[in-house]
Amino acid sequence: MPLSSTQIGALAENLVANELMIGSEGRLSAFQPIADDDGIDVLIYDKITGNACPIQIKARTNTLKKRASQERGNVVHFEVRKATFIEDRNTVLLCALLSPDLRHTERVWLIPYSAMVDLTMDTGSKYIIRANKLLNTSDKYKPYQCKDMEEVASRIIGICNVGR
């Protein structure tokens, strides 16, 4: 029996939390809410500044198929329901492409909620992100793309340093 999307989501949240702790050499700690009905999956706490960064995590295990064939391309599709989106929050969307075996993240995009409305496609009920996973891409999501979890940790530490 294959894993459900709920199970994959839970694995992704824990995988990201673990990789952030490792990538920050222990500076960042992750806390998960008992209920994430407001769209916050993980709160990342910076032990040095005492500040925290709320994160919503969206994960995929594969890229979209190419139009003319059944082969996988380089574009990853993520969706954020508007029901869980509040633009004025200091929240960051973390979009993760997971390895097929769900053991690590292959690519990550860290997008501030403040950029979501202008950056994404709006379907009425959802915001759509279609980002190219290649490091040498020049798509509009390139400024938010991170090469590894160490870079993600560094960017989150930067967010936590604001105002201190």
Image (tube, helix red, strand yellow):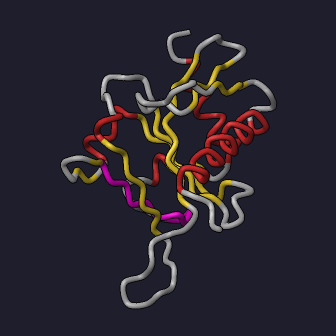
**Quarter of the image containing the N terminus?**
bottom right
Confirm whether the magenta stretch covers residue 128: yes
Residue most toward the left? 124
Residue 27: % across, % down: 75, 24
Front in this rendered view, residue 164 or 94: 94
Give the residue displayed 26% in from the left and 41% down from the top: 117
Give the number of marks: 0
In front: 11, or 104? 11
Relative image position of residue 96 (x, y in whole percent):
56, 52
Task: Describe residue 148's horizontal placement relative to residue 163 as left or right.
Answer: right
Q: Which of 14 and 136 is in front in this view?
A: 14
Q: In which quarter of the image is the C terminus?
A: top right
Q: Which residue is drawn at 49% across and 47% down?
A: 58
Decide which of 94, 118 is in the foreground and name it: 94
Question: Residue sitting at 58 percent across and 34 percent down?
Answer: 155
Residue 102, relative to residue 6: is it above or below?
Answer: below
At a point 33% along the width and 41% down the height, the residue shown is 116
User: Does residue 15 lie above or below 154 as drawn?
Assistant: below
Magenta extent: 127-137
Looking at the picture, how far across and down is residue 143, in whole percent?
A: 46, 48
Horizontal side of residue 109 vs 126, given as left or right: right
State left or right for residue 12 relative to residue 76.
Answer: right
